[in-house]
Image (tube, rainbow, N blue to C red):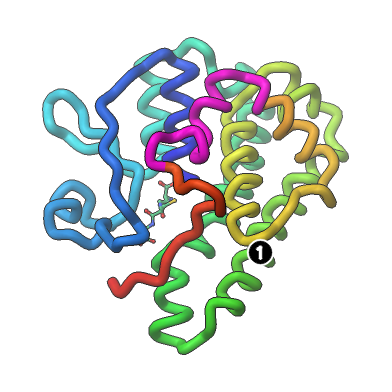
Amino acid sequence: MAAFRVRIVMNLNGVTAEERQVDLGEGRQHDPAFLAINPQGAIPVLVLDDGRSLVQSMAIIEYFEDTCPEPPLLPADPPGRARVRALAQMAVADGHPLVSPRVRTYLEVELGRGEAQYMAWSRHFMGRALEAMEGHLARDAETGMFCHGDRATLADICLVSQVTGFSYFGGTADAFPVVTRINAACMEIDAFRHAHPRAQPDAPKGQAPRPPATAA
Ligand SMILES: N[C@@H](CCC(=O)N[C@@H](CS)C(=O)NCC(=O)O)C(=O)O
């Protein structure tokens, strides 16, 4: 989900980079070689030409905002910027962190919960984040073709990653009509569509990818 967000922004900016996959299913995020790059053991990581590593999808996206400001991912007016950031955070800060592989590992390995409980937990919290986004999007006059007006912003990038992540846990955004409409509008855009996890060369065939319970 987090790498999906970064891929969208890179596509929007026309930035290419050599991509290296980290197999979370195999627990490769815990390999010493990867931890040397990101001690948090999480993806995405952007390694710059000078060898420095940028981590955290929102920080990497801000880096691209600073270095490739076209197209802008935030509106110009401060209240609009705050609204877009707030919508983005509902997905990135309130939904996604509760379902990462490390959460699954803790629930299943440390607390002895079964896979079904992890799936129910994840569906619940991913759905709650989408419900929150829907509440604002359905109510606010600023909502347009996209989350904020008629051009895609950071909020849309986070919305599509949230909808896709929800589907990993058997959730469907059908109950959230504005979210569903905006997700479909985003997926009409090449930069979004080509960044989708299913469009990646390492995408598993058939079933949607799901974070594994690896021992950390
Ligand atoms: N807040 C971070 C989240 C990064 C994150 O948790 N990424 C997941 C994959 S979407 C991961 O690598 N998890 C590894 C784990 O939980 O062990 C961001 O937005 O970059």
Q: Position of residue 20 (x, y in %)?
A: 26, 38
Task: Determine whether 34 is above or below 76 in the image.
Answer: below
User: What segment is highlighted magenta in the picture?
Assistant: 187-202
Q: Amino acid at mark 1?
A: Arg
Q: Quadrant of residue 45?
A: top left
Say which residue appears at 82% left-offset and 48% top-offset.
174
Q: Secondary structure at mark 1?
A: helix
Task: Determine whether 13 is above or below 140 in the image.
Answer: above
* Pointer 1 residue Cβ closer than 8 Å to ligand 1: no
Left or right, 41 with respect to 136, comes to left
- Magenta stretch holds residue 190: yes
Q: Residue furthest bottom?
A: 112
Q: Residue furthest top?
A: 70
Q: Position of residue 215 (x, y in %)?
A: 30, 74
Q: Residues within 10 Å of mark 1 (few under 14, many from 20)?
A: many
Quadrant where the C terminus is found in the figure = bottom left
Q: Position of residue 108 (x, y in %)?
A: 46, 81
How many marks overall?
A: 1
Task: Determine whether 213 is above or below 41 in the image.
Answer: below
- Magenta stretch holds residue 175: no
Say which residue appears at 79% left-offset and 43% top-offset.
136
Q: Nearer the viewer, residue 122 or 81?
A: 122
Residue for badge 1 = 123
Say which residue appears at 44% left-offset and 43% top-offset.
203
Say which residue appears at 46% left-offset and 87% top-offset.
111
